[in-house]
Image (tube, grey):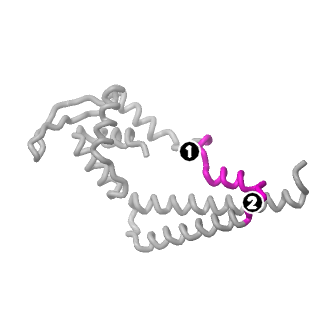
Amino acid sequence: MSIRHSLLALLTEQPRTPAELRHSFHEATDNFWTLNMGQVTQTLTRLERDGCITPVGSTLTATGHEAVSYAITDEGLAEIAAWWTNPVLRPATERDELVIKVSLAIDRSDVDFLDVLDTQRRAVLAQIQQVNKLLRQTDSSFSAQRLAAERRIFDLESDARFLDRVEAMMNDSSRKGPKP
């Protein structure tokens, strides 16, 4: 999750204090994801250092402390505009534990490869059922929680298809004979 860009997006609406940013983030995500104040203040420090935001004054909080308000700069506006227009892609070099596990298990005599696939497949299907149950209990409105659950289902379905593909590849490979 890009906290940096989330805070910049909120600052395009109006200047805010760290507490207001945290509250606005929680509101925007229906409290599905939470930020602690340390994350917010650390990110604001970096954004200020990078010239994306600037302090524009301070206000007295309900507890009597002074809180700095921040506004987005032209550089910050350019960065958030780029974020909105660029796709979010997962890194291709990300280590995938499932791929590693399958790769290591396939040629081991002490591991039942099909059992590894079946165990994983059962776990994936159980997770899909869990998320679907959660969705049935969730408000059908367009919310961060619903989007995250829908995304999770697609990810899990992808894992199930991957396991089916691996098994098909293994079956195809075994018909061709052992590796030279």
| Residue 98, image quadrant | bottom right
Q: Tell me residue 158's x, y (percent).
A: 62, 59
For residue 140, side relative to residue 126 (left or right): left
Which residue is at 40% across, 57% downward? 144
Name the kind of residue labelled 2 in the image.
Asp
Q: Is residue 164 above or below residue 76?
A: below
Q: Tell me residue 126's x, y (percent).
A: 56, 70
Which residue is at 27% across, 44% downward? 37
Reading the image, the residue beneath label 2 is 110
Label 1 near label 2: C-beta < 8 Å?
Answer: no
Mark 1 surroundings within 10 Å by alpha-carbon count, few (fewer than 14), some (14 through 19), many (20 or more): few
Residue nearest the viewer, comparing 72 with 108? 108
Q: Tell me residue 78's x, y (percent).
A: 40, 31
Q: Which residues are magenta?
A: 92-114
The stretch drawn in magenta includes residue 46: no
Residue nearest the viewer, comparing 11 with 109? 109
Q: Is residue 162 above or below residue 46?
A: below
For residue 56, side relative to residue 92 (left or right): left
| Callout 1: SS | loop
Q: What is the number of callouts on the image?
A: 2
The stretch drawn in magenta includes residue 103: yes
Name the kind of residue labelled 1 in the image.
Arg
Residue nearest the viewer, comparing 72 with 136? 136
Residue nearest the viewer, comparing 47 with 118? 118
For residue 48, side relative to residue 172 (left or right): left
Q: Tell me residue 131's x, y (percent).
A: 49, 68
Reading the image, the residue beneath label 1 is 90
Looking at the image, is mark 2 or mark 1 earlier in the sequence? 1
Which residue is at 40% across, 61% downward? 145
| Callout 2: SS | loop
